[in-house]
Image: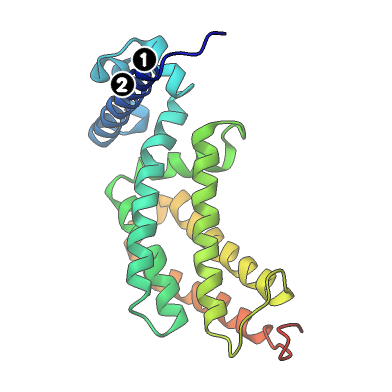
């Protein structure tokens, strides 16, 4: 296959990015206006002013479109949570600060948040945007683990048992958060913050109770 000249390749890349941005803007607006269930892929392609066939080259399903939209929101919430956590000396308060922006974003449109959690958990593993979403989950888990490790008296060696347990604690925090986000029937997510804090406190206490280490950073 003949390689495209640099100028032509540059135009193609710019066109692809411009179309992707239009799709993202259209899907974001429509999901916010009518909810995930009330929107069709055809309506998104019409709003973005592109052909349906073109739309599906960027996202193969409506579920992928939702992942595209809410991955961006998840990423922004993680950034806000990371900055908020830096103001807390208490590890429980710091971890809670990491996840509160995610709860706040979910409260703005419960239906979409539930659908996003479902796509993260059950979507086809090869989907690009699902892979991006699970990477964001791993980022949150690592943020939690690093904060817990920073509260120990000495540094943990990479790959040590205590580091593994910190990552498990991070996964536990996300598991609790996921159950809240995927189960909206109990009311607004923000109403469950005290319960979330208690569960985080239990996870944090469990980690520190089992994190006794030798000076070399091993149990």
Q: What element carries label 1?
A: helix
The C terminus appears in which quarter of the rendering? bottom right
The N terminus appears in which quarter of the rendering? top right
Residue at 59% x, 62% y: name it: 171
The tag earlier along the polypeptide, 1 or 2, is 1
Label 1 vs label 2, nearer the camera: 1
Q: Residues within 10 Å of mark 1 (few under 14, many from 20)?
A: few
Q: Mark 1 points at which residue?
A: 8
x and y, in percent, of residue 216 in the image: 73, 86
x and y, in percent, of residue 91 in the image: 46, 80
The front one of 184 and 56 is 56
x and y, in percent, of residue 204 in the image: 55, 78
Q: Is residue 79 above or below residue 219?
A: above
Q: Is mark 2 on a helix, strand or loop?
A: helix
Q: Image check: 66 left or right of 208? A: left
Q: Mark 2 points at which residue?
A: 44
Can you tell which mark lies on residue 42?
none
Residue at 45% x, 79% y: name it: 92
Residue at 49% x, 51% y: name it: 136
x and y, in percent, of residue 12 in the image: 37, 18
Q: Is residue 37 above or below residue 45?
A: below
The part of the image, by quadrant, that contains residue 78 is: bottom left
Q: Can residue 207 be seen in this view?
A: yes
Q: Is residue 102 visible?
A: no
Q: Image check: 168 left or right of 67? A: right
Residue occupying the far right of the picture: 219
Residue at 45% x, 18% y: name it: 57
């Amino acid at each position: 296959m003949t390689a495209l000249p640099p100028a032509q390749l540059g135009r193609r890349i710019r066109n692809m990015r411009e179309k992707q941005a239009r799709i993202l803007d259209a899907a974001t607006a429509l999901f916010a206006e009518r909810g995930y269930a009330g929107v069709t892929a055809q309506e998104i392609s019409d709003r973005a002013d592109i052909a349906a066939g073109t739309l599906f080259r960027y996202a193969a399903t409506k579920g992928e479109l939702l992942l595209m939209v809410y991955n961006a929101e998840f990423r922004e919430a993680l950034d806000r949570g990371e900055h908020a956590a830096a103001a807390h000396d208490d590890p429980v308060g710091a971890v809670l600060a990491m996840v509160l922006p995610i709860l706040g974003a979910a409260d703005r449109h419960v239906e979409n948040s539930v659908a996003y959690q479902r796509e993260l958990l059950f979507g086809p593993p090869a989907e690009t945007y699902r892979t991006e979403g699970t990477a964001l989950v791993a980022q949150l888990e690592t943020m939690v683990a690093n904060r817990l490790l920073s509260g120990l008296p000495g540094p943990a060696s990479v790959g040590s048992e205590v580091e593994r347990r910190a990552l498990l604690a991070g996964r536990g925090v996300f598991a609790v958060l996921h159950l809240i986000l995927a189960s909206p029937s109990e009311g607004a997510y923000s109403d469950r913050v005290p319960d979330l804090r208690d569960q985080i406190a239990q996870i944090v206490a469990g980690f520190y109770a089992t994190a006794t280490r030798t000076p070399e950073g091993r149990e």
